[in-house]
Image (cartoon, helix red, strand yellow):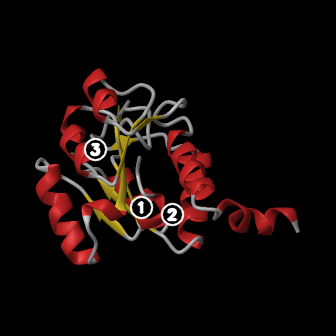
Amino acid sequence: MANFEKIKMLVLDVDGVLTDGKIVVNADGSESKLFCVQDGHGIRMWRRAGLKVAFLSGRKAGPTHVRAQQIEADYCLEDCHDKVGALKGLLVEAQMTEEEIAYVGDDLPDVPVIRRAGFGVAVANAVDEAKACADYVTSRSGGDGAVREVIEYILKETGRWEGAMERYLA
């Protein structure tokens, strides 16, 4: 089982995790994506708990960058065709180890990162290979609250959930 006390950063795949994996290509060539508001709010709660968040996406897309800015992600890595290499660079920059991250993915390029993370997660609609190597498989699908589920799970496991809830219960 993961040592949740060591987790300092949540690293998220984007397409299929923060979104349902569908991409709308508009007539002008621009893209649109749907992001779950509950995931976004969960990420804000995560950051208020003093923890970091990073996006690690195999694709480069305007909506990903905009969403990262909106939720004040600490890092937004896009166009990462070698996710392990990108993760290694991120860890050097953040001065962290693999053991200090939770990673959430859904597809084959995520498998090596799920395996390396201190807490590797696959979303409910992930491919079987990702689910097989994950420490945890969410009950919610990507783009439908899976990230929020992971955040709540870790915050509850570390006793930080009550503190995160104080502002709502005042």
- Callout 3: 10 Å neighbours few (<14), some, many (20+)? many
Please provide percent x and percent y for residue 48. 59, 72
Give how far across and how far down residue 106 sits, in percent.
33, 34
Mark 1, Cα crowd under 10 Å, few <14 / some 14-19 / many 20+, is some
Q: Amino acid at mark 3?
A: Ile
Residue shown at 42% from the left, 63% from the top: 7
Toward which corner of the image does residue 24 lie, by quadrant?
top left
Residue 67: x and y in percent read 44, 57
Q: Earlier in the sequence, mark 2 or mark 3?
A: 2
Q: Amino acid at mark 2?
A: Ile
Local secondary structure at mark 2: loop
Numbered badge on residue 114: 3
Of residue 35 and residue 142, the one placed in the foreground of this image is 142
Q: Residues within 10 Å of mark 2 (few under 14, many from 20)?
A: some
Outermost residue to the front = 1
Residues marked 3 and 1 touching at CB (< 8 Å): no
Contact between labelled residues 2 and 1, with CB atoms less than 8 Å apart: yes
Judging by the rendered image, the residue that carries numbered circle 2 is 71
Query: From mark 3 to mark 1, how far is it between C-alphas?
Result: 21 Å
- Residue tagged by mark 1? 68
* Left or right position of 81 against 65: left
Residue occupying the point 35% across, 60% down: 101
